[in-house]
Image (cartoon, helix red, strand yellow):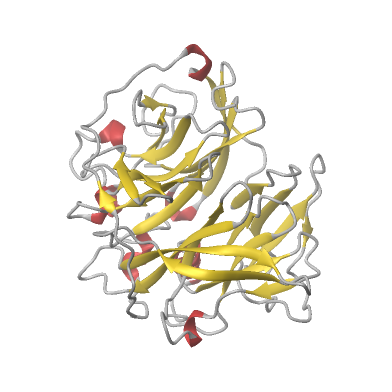
Amino acid sequence: MWHRFLSPRAVLVLAIIATGTLWGMIPHTVYAGQPAIQSSAGEPACRVKSVEKTSVAYENLAVSPHSGSLATTQLDPKGVYQVYTAKAGDKTFHCISCQPLKGGPRPDRNKPMVSWHPSGRWLVVGIEEDQHDLMWMPKSWQRGLLQSGIWLNIWVASPDGTHWHQMTNFKKSKDAPADGYVGMPFTPDGTIGVWAEAVDGNVFANAFGIWKLYAAHFGVNHDGKPVLRGKMDITPPGARWVEPGNIAPDGRHLLISADIGIEDAQGQDQFIYDLDTGKLTNLTNSPQVWDEHGLFSPNGKKIVFMSSYPYRNEKNSYKVASLKTEFMMMDSDGRHLQQLTHFNEPGYPESQKEHTIAAVAFFIGDGSQLYAMVMAPEFTKTNWIITFKGRCGG
């Protein structure tokens, strides 16, 4: 079947989502960026020692920068994504969303997206709307859309699941109706959160629809409830598709995946967006290469991301239907591009028989390892540990 292999992001092409309008765009200065960068072996500490599959696979794993506690989203016996948490050092996960709770989400709603607030006090959870279009679609297709952020509202929960707070209700928003979101990374002090909202699903006009980038102050009221205040549209001019990565340790520079200056959004680039000045720098500048999911290392000196760059000479290697990617790494200024994995190349320990998408990787521990999520046909996911020869990102 033609739909046998699509990335979660690319499945958005199947959906015609709710339309809306936004206003009040902040002016920005867009810089042309650097020419296509050349590969480099990298410094000794960043040379890859091993790429190994883990014994247990998680759909979505998040590690608290505060305590090392874990949160993951997994399918329950009924085929619904639930949120599970475990304290640092504890391999036993507990479901915090499987039972009905006052003020909490319905147990039968999917929760495919989870991340930590820097304080470790809160989880940000993407939760499926109670009602949405295309519920007639096969469950696997719906899961792909949900994993892409479609039909999700932003919720905040305590790590033990005793307190839940809905932060958005896109279906009832009069000012800026949306139909889902992706994010939300925070500044290191936890005071600012950034996310993107899907606001126009006309995929015939734009490959991934139109998304807007927002920032808001995150805080807690006197009654202990988390709130988002002062929501601001910070979408860079020219962006139709935009997705936040994470924010550098300086609390100022945000990584984004975007199609600015690119005719086909499938050729998205990695940009650094200065939250203070609005300056935008194109790090990859490769309009026929799929570059996505960039994340800073703990020390902010390295960026790991998924890319079809190794296959740039193959026709349509960056297109949805034939996409295959590897994990790449570069300096935070875009220099010293380095290929980390070879899932789609024979002769390597991690080589796979079918086209594989290296999806998301992030630094763990002291910066000497990456935890990676990889996707194969039929949305099958595996997890991998990439170990460097030294403290590459610490």
Q: Which residue is at the far front?
A: 277
Q: Nearer the viewer, residue 351 or 94?
A: 94
Quarter of the image with the C terminus is top right
Q: In the shown orientation, is residue 352 left or right of residue 206?
A: right
Image position, residue 226 (x, y; %): 69, 69
* Rendered image quadrant of residue 289: top left
Image position, residue 172 (x, y; %): 50, 87
Image position, residue 82 (x, y; %): 67, 65
- Residue at the image position 39 percent from the left and 54 percent from the top: 7
* Rendered image quadrant of residue 97: bottom right
- Residue at the image position 42 percent from the left and 33 percent from the top: 343
Q: Looking at the image, can residue 142 be seen? A: yes
Q: With respect to residue 302, does 109 lie above or below?
A: below
* Rendered image quadrant of residue 203: bottom left
Q: Nearer the viewer, residue 314 or 183?
A: 183
Q: Nearer the viewer, residue 229 or 40?
A: 229
Q: With respect to residue 233, does 43 lie above or below?
A: above
Q: With respect to residue 168, does 384 lie above or below?
A: above
